[in-house]
Amino acid sequence: MLIGVDIGTSAVKIVLVDDGETVVADAELPLRPTHPAPLWSEDDPDTWWQAFCDGLDKLAADAPKAMAAVRAIGLSGQMHTLVALDAADRPVRPAILWNDGRSRAEAAELAALGLDLQRRTGVLPMPGLTAPKVLWMARHEPDTFQRTRTIMLAKDYVRLRLSGERATDVSDAAGTWLLDQARRTWCDEAVAACGARPDMLPRLVESPEPCGMLSPELAARWGLPRGVVISGGAGDVAAGGIGVGAVDPGDAFISIGTSSQIFVADDAHRPQPELLVHAFCHALPARWFRMAALLNGASPLAAAAQWTGGASVATLLAEVEAAYAGPSKLLALPYLSGERTPHNDPLARGAIVGLTRDTSRADVVQAIAESVAFSLVDGLDVLGGGGGSAPTRLALIGGGARSAFWARLIASVLGVQLVRYASSERGPAFGAVRLARLASGGEDPASVVVKPAIADVIDPDLALHDAYRPRVEAFRTLYRSLKPVWPSVSL
């Protein structure tokens, strides 16, 4: 038995899985990040820990015999989030999340250090990455920064509470802008540039390595055996790749959770920072990936559910499907949290144009669902730029994979074939299970990190693809037209 955990933005997801990769029990505990100032996004690391504990309590109650047979725990989590700890390993301030845009000036300052450093660290420094936040904290909260002894990422705070280990894996460290991606070691020049010291950083491990042991006290609390191993784990995107077997060059997927990503696996570090492509270490040794990172995935639909009376996203998408007659007459921008690829614009915001007295809730939701698909077109185009090649067949994972209608819409807008695997909506937590299995001993990654059973294959509707092409161009025109307005509505 194995446990996989994903410390997400909106929830902590936990799965208990047997050796046949059948889910025996699971838990999902909501999180509620706060936004105390314009562009800010924060959460209390102890709420992640409490949610994790509540989830393990549930698994212990639901499946005590299975829990008694657990041999390893795998961790995954939101990337880029800055967790700053004092000498007693306590948070000195709320964690600054990946969708926080306060460090615009610091990101620009780090970018001015040149293209060579960007290629080594994998991407242009952007406000959502960890390093600009560290520099922001050093500048704007010097007392807090002076108290900081350790800089961590989200999942690694949970590891610390589980085992006492201060460590992270290279795939999660990849998103900090502090890692030399080709060498898979901390980059001293980047660390110094953001005002940190090497001794503030956790030790680095590869994702499948054992990295800590569950404390006897916690093992007793949850009915787990002694000696449960904790794997190095992975950032959520890389863990998603492990979950669907996307590890060989050209393997690709779209992940739609709170944010969304388009991911292409590779066997070498091939940076393209000038295109805002993220080139990061993967969660297996000698593997890397290229990624278009988009800050808004299913979250604009969740916001629409809140705006329109609280119906579930599934209900709203069912309404759209029932009324669907082709591309919407409305046009929306999904940028509720700014955007990274292809704009690097933390000030960008959402918009809907074309409203009339006859506009229905389904009309609004359709336009928002289409806008997320249009942003994925932008991401796919970036991955195909600069001599690269964009994939024509992708897996679809994450919570956004649940809706067959939205999947068909995305496939048609992009003009690509989408594959949904069994348990694809579990995404990073399922990948964390596989890393736990590797950490528990002896197996060949090639026999563990395989593609799951296919649930269905979604072919694009080529006529619909042609119908959406002018809407994609209108979407891009709308962003360019509103860009001068963003500072007046977002600051």
Image (cartoon, helix red, strand yellow):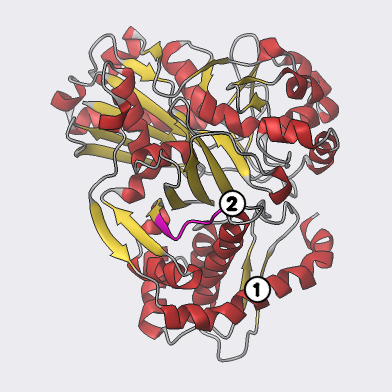
Q: Nearer the viewer, residue 232 or 356?
A: 232
Q: Can residue 13 be seen in this view?
A: no
Q: What stretch is highlighted in magenta?
A: 389-394
Q: What residue type is labelled 1?
A: Phe
Q: Is residue 91 visible?
A: yes
Relative horizontal placement of residue 377, taking residue 72 as reference (left or right): right
Q: Which residue is drawn at 39% across and 22% down?
A: 208
| Residue 325 inside the magenta-drawn segment | no
The residues bearing labels 1 and 2 have C-alpha atoms spaced at a distance of 24 Å
Relative horizontal placement of residue 378, taking residue 483 as reference (left or right): left
The single residue placed furthest to the left in the displayed view is 65
Q: As displayed, is residue 460 above or below residue 430?
A: below
- Give the quadrant of residue 61: top left
x then y, percent, for residue 249:
45, 42
x then y, percent, for residue 77:
48, 34
Q: Residues within 10 Å of mark 2 (few under 14, many from 20)?
A: few
Disc 1 designates what residue? 475
Q: What residue type is labelled 2?
A: Gly
Q: Which residue is drawn at 31% across and 23% down?
A: 438
| Residue 392 inside the magenta-drawn segment | yes
Principal secondary structure, stretch drawn in magenta: loop
Label placed on residue 388:
2
